[in-house]
């Protein structure tokens, strides 16, 4: 099982092993973005099958993975995705990918039969040919050259150079003056400036490409980027706007100094800021890098209500208010729970109320995580069949438990078979899984009657049925 570690500066050498060779080009696949935005996205990482797996968290989107980054000729992306799927099943969340590289979208669409895709214009990265920004050659860049020529006339002593450790004081002085002239009221814009200020503290680290424009001993522009594959990813480009022409001068000088041998320069997204969008478009991007969010869904996503299923003696349907006393007794039966393989005490938060178990079952269906069928004999509640642990790839697990006074009459096996039939042929699953303890002879007999053995470990026997 994947175990994640929150990202901080100490992980830079390990993470750059992956990001430095990454071919995805989008800015989210860079160390700088992870460090710069870590208080917003709370990224954590794990290594799996020669791949870097990053898990991000946000208040709005919840848990979202980056697409695995493989080491060249070592990484097994499909195996890493299998680990992501297993983590999601164990944590009861669907696989969600925050930024899917264009070349990998089809792989995920084939992997997950049901998906929701969101392509947000506000977050598309601006990509430029490295040679274009390094030279501003040709008629189409005449405007930028004119701005640079004017800047040179106004500030003939201004120079571009890399930042040095001794510049820390000058950088702080730059930020103080920048905040005085910064006039945007947007909360995201203010947050970006604060994060940019923090990431500039990484100037001097081996991975960070830095630059500044200095005029009469004063910094009037600063920049920071990193190389990821064939792309220079620019994280910070800030200048004092009262120095006319300083931004084109910074863009060209920084590109010329840091993009040798590279194909692309990624100046990141505009976040819907009108001024930023106008500026980035004026530099004539070669294309906008789309950022697709992909949420894998399971077969329950198309199910509006819990159906009514009938077998020879039983009816399976949704839990009702009047089922609460018997359902509570079933859920609180420690002997039954021992074979069920679940102890509610491990997940219980707060007080155990009368409607706790019923509300959990209903919430699980509302979130399309599980279906809890009430098993009824002549209208009376006698147990439940639960379809859960959906892997969003056509598989789920089925379990069944019966109140002790109804045990030994084959009701569990009958309910299980009917729920299994509906799961495969009504709901449309490709694969149904089940398990039982080695010592649970009754469950083993039931599962062997309608499913194929699928392996075992020290604790469980595993079964499956495919269509």
Image: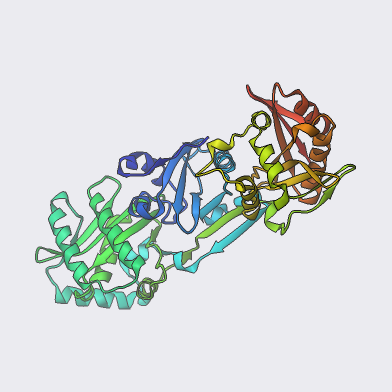
**Residue 356 percent coordinates (x, y):** 60, 46
Q: Of residues 450 and 408, which is closer to you in this image?
A: 408
Is residue 137 left or right of 294 when viewed as pictured? left
Say if 403 sits above or below 159 in the image.
above
Say if 60 sits above or below 281 in the image.
above
Residue 185 is at least partly visible in this image = yes
Q: Of residues 408 and 194, which is closer to you in this image?
A: 408
**Residue 36 percent coordinates (x, y):** 33, 54
**Residue 13 percent coordinates (x, y):** 33, 40
- Colouring of the image: rainbow
Screen quadrant of the C terminus: top right
Please report the residue visible at 84 percent of the width from the left and 38 percent of the height from the top.
414
Number of numbered tags placed on the structure image: 0
Q: Which residue is the extreme one toward the right?
A: 312
Quarter holding residue 334: top right
Is residue 182 left or right of 422 when viewed as pictured? left
Q: Of residues 369 and 309, which is closer to you in this image?
A: 309
Q: Which residue is the extreme one toward the left?
A: 216
Is residue 432 left or right of 277 when viewed as pictured? right
Quarter holding residue 410: top right
Say if 354 sits above or below 161 in the image.
above
**Residue 98 percent coordinates (x, y):** 50, 55
Residue 396 is at least partly visible in this image = no
């Amino acid at each position: 099982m994947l175990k994640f570690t929150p990202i901080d500066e100490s992980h830079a050498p390990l993470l750059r092993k992956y990001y430095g060779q990454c071919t995805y080009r989008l800015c989210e696949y860079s160390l700088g973005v992870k460090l710069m935005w870590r208080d917003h996205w709370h990224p954590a990482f794990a290594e799996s099958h020669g791949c870097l797996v990053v898990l991000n968290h946000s208040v709005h989107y919840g848990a979202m993975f980056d697409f695995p980054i493989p080491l060249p000729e070592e990484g097994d992306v499909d195996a890493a995705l299998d680990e992501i799927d297993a983590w999601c099943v164990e944590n009861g969340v669907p696989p969600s990918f925050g930024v899917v590289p264009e070349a990998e979208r089809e792989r995920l669409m084939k992997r997950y039969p049901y998906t929701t895709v969101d392509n947000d214009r506000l977050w598309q990265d601006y990509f430029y040919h490295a040679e274009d920004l390094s030279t501003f050659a040709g008629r189409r860049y005449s405007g930028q050259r004119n701005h640079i020529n004017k800047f040179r006339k106004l500030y003939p002593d201004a120079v571009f150079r890399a930042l040095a450790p001794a510049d820390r004081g000058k950088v702080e002085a730059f930020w103080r003056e920048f905040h005085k002239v910064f006039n945007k009221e947007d909360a995201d814009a203010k947050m970006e400036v604060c994060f940019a200020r923090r990431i500039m503290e990484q100037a001097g680290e081996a991975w960070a490409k830095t630059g500044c424009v200095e005029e009469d001993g004063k910094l009037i522009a600063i920049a920071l980027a990193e190389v990821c594959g064939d792309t220079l990813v620019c994280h910070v480009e800030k200048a004092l706007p009262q120095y006319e022409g300083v931004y084109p001068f910074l863009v060209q000088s920084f590109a010329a100094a840091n993009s040798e041998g590279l194909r692309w320069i990624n100046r990141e997204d505009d976040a819907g800021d009108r001024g930023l969008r106008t500026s980035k478009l004026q530099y004539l991007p070669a294309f906008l890098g789309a950022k697709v969010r992909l949420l894998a869904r399971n077969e329950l996503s198309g199910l509006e209500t819990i159906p009514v299923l009938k077998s020879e003696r039983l009816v399976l349907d949704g839990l009702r208010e009047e089922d609460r006393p018997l359902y509570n007794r079933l859920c609180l039966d420690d002997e039954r729970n021992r074979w069920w393989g679940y102890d509610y005490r491990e997940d219980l938060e707060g007080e155990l109320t009368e409607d706790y178990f019923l509300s959990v079952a209903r919430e699980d269906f509302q979130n399309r995580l599980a279906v809890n069928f009430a098993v009824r004999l002549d209208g009376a509640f006698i147990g439940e069949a639960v379809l859960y642990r959906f892997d969003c790839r056509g598989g789920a697990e089925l379990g069944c438990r019966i109140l002790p006074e109804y045990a030994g009459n084959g009701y569990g096996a009958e309910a299980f078979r009917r729920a299994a039939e509906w799961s495969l042929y009504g709901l449309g699953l490709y694969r149904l899984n089940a398990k039982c303890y080695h010592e649970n002879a009754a469950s083993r007999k039931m599962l062997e009657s309608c499913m194929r053995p699928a392996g075992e470990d020290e604790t469980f026997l595993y079964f499956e049925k495919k269509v």
